[in-house]
Image (tube, helix red, strand yellow):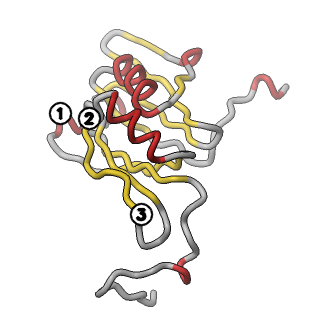
Amino acid sequence: MSSHELWKAPGVVPSLAYEDVPAAAEWLTRAFGFRERSEARLSWPGGSMTWMELGDDILIHIEAAGAHERQSPKSLGAVSHALKVYVDNVDEHFMQAKEAGATIISEPEDKFWGGRVYEARDPEGHHWEFSERGRERAPDAWQLPKGVIRSQP
């Protein structure tokens, strides 16, 4: 098999359910800077799926709610997971997401482990955490908040 016949994918690909996959793909592109692998979008009566990527190291699969027993947080009224995504400049990314109408959970903030992080929800309620690449320190360099201690396994 030649290399042009192979699908480039990371070791883990989360799958998220959306009630409106085309609208989600457009919004994720505009607000969070994802790119759709549009050549791989599939549609069928009552549903669709596609793959979204950010940089060279994150790929997510989005599919119609109800497929593979998955539901959108919008229809469930609850969030069961969050995705942490690393970006080059979290403050710029935050402004882009905010201007595109993301629901901001928390604004960019420096964390005890060195990361600079903000959290947002997309229009269907998926929870996203964005962290600036290259800032997180090794655990022995964390500045633990008062009352937090390292525990042994």
Q: Nearer the viewer, residue 125 or 104?
A: 104
Identity of the residue drawn at 37% across and 53% down:
108
Residue 72, numbered circle: 2
**In whole angstroms, how far apart are the C-alphas of marks 1 and 3?**
33 Å
> Which quadrant would the C terminus be assigned to in this image?
bottom left
User: Which quadrant of the structure image shows residue 70?
Assistant: top left
Q: Is 105 on the left or on the right of 29, as rendered?
A: left
Q: Which residue is mark 1?
A: 75
Of circles 1 and 3, which is in front?
3
Q: Label 2 to label 3, Cα distance in Å?
A: 30 Å
Q: Classify mark 1: helix, strand or loop.
A: helix
In percent of width and height, residue 139 lies at 53, 78
Q: Residues within 10 Å of mark 1 (few under 14, many from 20)?
A: few
Q: Residue 39, which numbered label?
A: none
Q: Amino acid at mark 1?
A: Ser
Nearest the camera: 35 or 143? 143
Q: From mark 1 to mark 2, how far is it between C-alphas?
A: 5 Å
Judging depth in this view, the residue of 137 and 2 nearest the camera is 137
Rendered view: 152 above or below 3: below
- Density class for disc 2 (Cα within 10 Å; few <14, some 14-19, many ≥20) is many
Residue at disc 3, secondary structure? strand
Question: As displayed, is residue 103 above or below residue 80?
Answer: above
Give percent across and percent down for residue 7: 68, 30
Left or right? Give the position of 62 relative to 3: left
- On the image, the x and y values in percent for residue 45 come to 34, 9
Circle 3 residues within 10 Å: few <14, some 14–19, many ≥20: some
Element marked by disc 2: loop
Label pair 1/2, CB-CB below 8 angstroms: yes
- Determine the residue positioned at 23% across, 39% down: 73
